[in-house]
Image: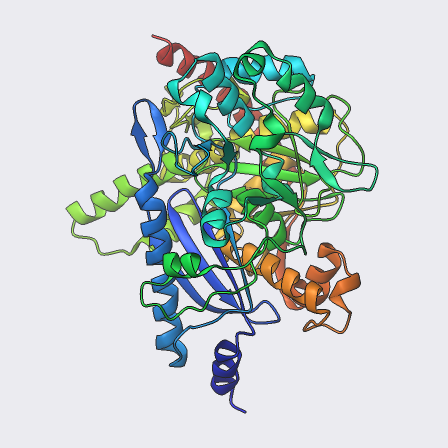
Amino acid sequence: MAELEIAKEIIANGKTALGIEFGSTRIKAVLIDEAGNTLAVGTYDWENELQDGLWTYAQTDIFAGLKACYASLKTDVQEKFGVTLTTIGAMGISAMMHGYLAFNKEGDLLVPFRTWRNTNTTKAAHALTELFSFHIPERWSIAHLYQAMLDQEPHINQVASITTLAGYVSRELTGENILSVGDASGMFPVRRDANNTPIYDPSFVTLFDETPEAQELDMHVAELLPKIRVAGQTAGKLTEKGAALLDDDGDLQAGIPVAPAEGDAGTGMIATNSVAPRTGNVSAGTSVFSMTVMDKPLPNPKLNEIDIVATPSGDPVAMVHCNNCTSDLNAWMDLFSSYNELMGVTLDTGALFTKLFNAALLAEKDAGGLCTVPFVSGEPIMADEAGRPLFAREPTAKMSIADFMRAQIMSCFGALKVGNDILLEQGVMVDVLYGHGGIFKTPLVAQSILAAAMQTAITVYETAGEGGAWGEALAALYMLQKQSGQSASNAAPATQTLGQWLEATVFSKIKGETVQPDTKDIEGFNRYIDVFKQLNAAEKTLVNK
């Protein structure tokens, strides 16, 4: 049977899995076959907005974007295969982790969605960190909840449940208030119980419930949080209401099994095959974070620069999360693009990025006296409460485009390096790191610079551009095959861990490019980071004026 006919049959019979991820600037849907190969893609661009001093996405935009993204996928399926998408083997929703979505007993959203990007929760985060002796970052859901309690916001006495963006969308599709342990671990600290089952840490639940603010509200935090599931478990089925939220045409059938809603950190781990101990990945986009799966507990769980979260299977992960990565770089690229237009030069965006990124390889290793702080928003790792992008140079710097681009790319990883240097001091070891995200599309450039920052080899798979939506599709496929006991690989998925299944079913056939750190690159980055820290101090002075 011809390849096209096989694909048609696969799609028509629902031998597929769908992942939809809500990123910071794009909603993406990926439909895959039983071996993890991408069949079709849908996208929808969106953007956060600053409303009353808080970063948010409008509630209407969330579901309009969901519908538009699915429609884009459906069109792609029709154009490629001549098939109308009516059923799917399994699906899942992923999104930016953390943030705050609070609902009353009727399920109404009480305040606009507060994203991970907000840093107004400093007081609450510090108080909970001291209370738990465990680092609670500003972007975590529990910090947002407690800050609202401290501020005595009018809505707080009506809160009946809280969840993440992925949890909210998944709940609307299934009617079930369930999260993957990976996403849940960015709401409230989790640990394993005596049966090795991930749960919200009972000791921290008790401490929170005993705070004066919770006592006054008679609030029990465990009752507000979603139920936890691990990779391979189901989180409900698509309802008729959910199918209508996705497909305006009414073609999509209800009853599709849905995987636990996952955060973008979890889908990044899946998409890079880094869910086993001593593996890790770096996800670079609007924000940048590294995830290192630990083989032993972190000696100091109170470090402000390190978050303790979990893999989709519940293993502990040391996360270094930075709010800022490519936003300032993209703004400069827009400037170069507008210059081209002014000069009558025709060069598409992809070619522009490729040429300018490759120029960075010709630069001085320390960017020749140029430096930039790319913080559009606050950066907790660097103790920045607000953003103020800043570019500076030594008076004698030659201002070459090569040095400028190298400075920009190194700065994308600047705060990440600061955090990971601390992690290294804690004795957390990693055997292999995988990179993924748009910054790695130009081969070897950002990859070699990241290798210098992390002082370890960086592997980028040929699927690195697929992103979190593909990772969530794989999570849905793993759930489907684990429940049915049938997979595209020879081993029985019912007995495989997520890592074993990924290796056997997906990554054994995917190529990757590995770059070892270069000594001169490391030395150059170390010189650069010293200047970066000094410039960051100057940026703080500007912000505080």
Q: Nearer the viewer, residue 237 or 506?
A: 237
Whether residue 273 is situated above or below residue 378 in the rendered picture = below
| Quadrant of the frame with the C terminus | top left
Whether residue 122 is situated above or below residue 253 in the rendered picture = above
The structure residue drawn at horizontal position 60% and vertical position 31%, both measured from the top left corner, is: 223
Q: Is residue 524 visible?
A: no
Query: From this viewpoint, which residue is outermost toward the top?
Result: 545
Q: How many marks?
A: 0
Q: Nearer the viewer, residue 346 or 105?
A: 105
Q: Position of residue 467 (x, y in %)?
A: 51, 53
Q: Position of residue 348 (x, y in %)?
A: 29, 56
Q: Quarter of the image holding residue 494?
A: bottom right
| Quadrant of the frame with the N terminus | bottom right
Query: From this viewpoint, which residue is outermost toward the right?
Result: 194
The structure residue drawn at horizontal position 44% and vertical position 21%, both measured from the top left corner, is: 156
Q: Quarter of the image holding residue 283?
A: top right
Q: Quarter of the image holding residue 34?
A: bottom right
Say left or right for 400 vs 130: left
The structure residue drawn at horizontal position 76% and vertical position 44%, both measured from the top left corner, is: 277
- Image coloring type: rainbow
Q: Position of residue 71 (x, y in %)?
A: 34, 63
The structure residue drawn at horizontal position 60% and vertical position 38%, both measured from the top left corner, is: 184
Q: Is residue 414 visible?
A: yes
Whether residue 29 is situated above or below residue 224 in the rendered picture = below
Q: Nearer the viewer, residue 290 or 92?
A: 92
